[in-house]
Amino acid sequence: MRSIRAAAVGAVTMSLALAATACGGGSSSGGGSNDSPKTLTYWASNQGASIAVDKQVLQPELDKFQKQSGIKVKLEVVPWSDLLNRILTATTSGQGPDVLNIGNTWSASLQATGALLPWDAKNFGKIGGKDRFVDSALGSTGATDKDPAAVPLYSMAYALYYNKKIFAEAGIAKPPTTWDELVADGKKIKAKGKSVIGAEGANVSENIHHVFVFAKQHGADFFTADGKPDFTNPKIVDAVKQYVDLMAEDKVIPTGDAEYAQNQSVSDFAKGKQAMLLWQSAAANLKSQGMSEDDYGITPVPVRSGTPGTGAQTNSMVAGINIAVFKNSHNLDGATQFVKFMTSDAEQKILNTAYTSIPPVKGAQSDAAFNSPANAVLKNTLATSAAALPQVSSESQFETAVGTAVKDLFADAAAGRAVTADSVKAKLEKAQQQMPAA
Amino acid sequence: MTTTALQEPVRKTSPGAAREPRRRTGRIRRIGLPYLLLLPALLLELLVHLVPMVIGIVMSFKELTQFYIRDWGTAPWSGLGNYQVSVDFDAPVGEALLHSFFVTVGFTLLSVGLCWLIGTAAAVYMQGTFRGRGLLRALFLVPYALPVYAAVITWVFMFQHDNGLVNHVLHDQLHLTDERSFWLIGDNSFYALLTVSVWKGWPFAFLIVMAGLQNIPGELYEAAALDGAGMWQQLRRITLPSLRPVNQVLVLVLFLWTFNDFNTPYVLFGKAAPEAADLISVHIYQASFVTWNFGTGSAMSVLLLLFLLVVTGGYLLFTSRGRRAADV
C-alpha cells in the first residue's frame, strides 16, 4: 500500500513538473539586461579555411579580451550552411548568443526581425563613433532609413584571380579587363586543354553576388527605388543571361560547374586545372590549398567596357561580415564592450591579416600590412567600384528565389538545353512571384 | 453462444450500509490509480506530440513572416490566407506545391514498390539454409544501419559529374552514355534520389518480411510439396497470404517514411532541390525557412498532414475490411 501511495505521489509530482516546464518556454519579448556581466557567448562565422583555423585565430584574442575586461567569451564558430538558420531559430526562441557575426547582405532582413540591437548614435558612441568606419562598409548594415543593425567587421571584395603559368602558356600577355577579352582569352586557354573560369553554379548566394554585379553593369537594379522586386526588367534579363551564357554560349565556364556548391571551383583553380577564378578575398583559402602566392595574379573583375568605377562600371558587391549584438542578451554592456574590442584598430589589424580581408575601420586600413598588391586591388575595388546589395527586408528571400533561378538556368545550360531571353525571363518571373508582398 | 446467457447474477447482500462510503473511496482509489500512473506519460505525449502540432496549426492561420518571428503573439491573423495561397494552383506558389506533390507521390509509389519487392525477394531467398547466410543477412542490413548523413553524402560523391563513380562506370568503362550525365541537377536527379531511397529503404522491408517468414509453419510447405506445389505456387499460395498482415503494416510504414523523407533529398541536393526531385518535405522547408514565411509553411504542413491522415485512414479501413472478410 505504501509503495502504491509513493508511486501515486511520484506520478503527480512528475506531472506537475512537466506542466511547469511546458509553460516555462516561450520567447521573452522584452529587451536585454545586464544580469550576467561576467560571460558572453559569441557566434563567429567561418572565415578561415576550416572551423579549427577560426578557433586558432580567435581564441588568443578572446583571451586577451578576458584579461582586459574580466569577461569570459564562449566561442562557437558556426558554418555558413547553418548560420542563418541558427540566427532565425535564436530569434524565434529568444535564446541566442550575445554577440554574433552575420553576412553583411543579411543586415536588412535581420534588422526587420527586430532581434538585433540598433546602433544608434548613443551605441556607436560607446565604440568610438560611426566615422571610424569606411562608408562603403556602413552601406551594408541595414535599411538606409533606420539605425544600422550591425557594425562592419571584415570587408571583402571580388577580384579576378588568374594562373600566371596557364596565361603564359596560352600566350596571354595581360589579364582581361572586359568580358569580351575574357571570352577571347578563353579560346586560347581551351586550346591548351585547360578549363577557363570557375563558377559555383549550384550555390545560391554565389549566383546572386554575380548576377547583382552583372545587373549593375547593365544599368539595372533588382529592386525599384521603393523596394519592390523588378526581376523581369529586360535589362535584368539581359544581365542574368550574360552570366549564364558564360557557360551556355561562350563556354568559358565548364558545364560540370553547374553542380558545384562546395567551393570546388576554388580547388580546381588551386590545383592548376583552371585558369581563372572570380572570388572574394581568396588568398588565405588558396594558400591553405597549397597554391603559392607567386603562382597567381590578382586583377579587378572585368566590366563590359572601359574601366571599373561606379554605376554601370561596378565590378563587385560590397562583401563582408558584420558583427551584431542580440537584443535579448543578458550582458548588453559586456556585448558592446566586446564589439568595441573587436573593431579596435589593433584587433582589426590582427584579424584582417589572418583572414586576408580588408579592415572596414579607417585607422586600421591605412596600415602598411594592407598595402600589398593583392590587397591594393581589393581595397581599390571597395573604395571605387563596389556596390552594396539591396538593403531591403526581403533581401534573403531574393537571394534564395533568384539564386535558385540562376541555379536552374545553369542546370539547363549544362544539360545542353537552350538558354534564351524567354527562358531566363520565365525563371525570373517565377522567382518574382515567390517574393513576399511588400 | 446464446443459450447459456442471461443468468441472473447472484448478488451478495451487503453486510451493512455503514461500510458503503469507505468501500466506494477504496474503489475510486483502485480505479483511479492506473490513470494516475498513466498521467505522466499522457502529459509527455501532449508535450512532445500534440502541443507542437496544435502550435503548428495555429501558426498556419497567422502571417508569421520575418517581421513577427521575434514575438509570435504580435503576428496578425491571416484567416485562411495561407491556405488560399497554398492551394491556388494557378499562381506560382500553389502550382509549385502541386508539382512537388505529384513528384512526391510518384517517387513514393516507385520507392515503396521497389523496396518491398527487393526486400521480399531477398528475404525469401535467405530462408533456405546455406553457408554464409548469416554474413549475407548482416551485409544486407548495412544500408539501414548506417547514419543517414554519412550514407547519403557518399552517394553525393558517387553521383558527381566530373569525378563521380557512377559516371566513371557508366561512361568511362561501359560507354553506355555519349557524355557524362548530371545526376544531382536536372531531370536525372529524380533517378538519383530514387536509387538512394531504395538503397536505404529495402533492408527494412527485408528485415520485417524475414521476421514474418519465421512465423509460417514449415509443415505447410511440406504438405504443399507433397501435394506437388512448386516453388512459385508455394510462394503464391502460402508465403504471400501468410505475410499479409505483416505486409499491410510494412507498406504503410514505408509509405509514411518515404513520403515524409527529408534527410535524403536535403543531403543530396541542399536547400534548393532540382524541380524533378522537389520532394514535398524539402519544398515546405524551403517555403518556410528559406523564405522566412512560417505561416504558409505551416499551412502546407497541415495540408500534408490532412492528406496523410486521409490516406492512412483509407488504407486501414480498406485493409481491415479485407481482413474481416477473410476471417469469415
Image (tube, coloured by chain):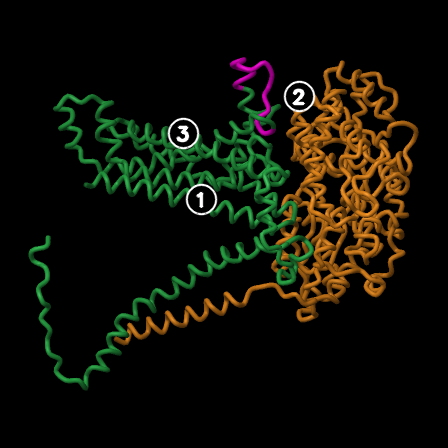
**Looking at the picture, which amino acid does disc 1 mark?**
Leu
Instruction: Kindly identify the residue that appears in the image at 77 percent across and 56 percent down.
Output: A149
Describe residue B246's horizontal placement relative to residue A194 as left or right: left
Pointer 1 with pointer 3, Cβ within 8 A: no
Magenta span of residues: B169-185
Of helix, strand and loop, which one carries label 3? helix
Identify which residue, A333 or A427, lies in the foreground.
A427
Image coordinates for residue A50, horizontal then vertical, percent = 66, 42
Task: Tell me if residue A325 can be seen.
Answer: yes
Find disc 3 in the rendering and name its residue.
Answer: B114
Find disc 2 in the rendering and name its residue.
Answer: A417
Instruction: State how many labels appear.
Output: 3
User: Is residue B244 within the magenta segment?
Assistant: no
Q: Which chain is green?
A: B
Q: Residues within 10 Å of mark 1 (few under 14, many from 20)?
A: some
Chain A painted colour: orange
Instruction: Kindly identify the residue that appears in the image at 58 percent across and 44 percent down.
Output: B86
Could you give the CA–CA distance between mark 1 and mark 3, rounded to whole angstroms? 21 Å
**Looking at the picture, which amino acid does disc 2 mark?**
Arg
Q: Residues within 10 Å of mark 3 (few under 14, many from 20)?
A: many
Q: Chain letter for mark 3, please.
A: B
Identify which residue, A37 or A431, lies in the foreground.
A431
Q: Which mark is residue B308?
A: 1
**Looking at the picture, which amino acid does disc 3 mark?**
Leu
- Quarter occupied by the C terminus of chain B: top left
Q: Chain letter for mark 2, please.
A: A
Identify which residue, A204 or A418, lies in the foreground.
A418
Q: Chain letter for mark 1, please.
A: B
Task: Tell me where residue A182 sits by quadrant.
Answer: top right
Image coordinates for residue A2, horizontal then vertical, percent = 28, 76
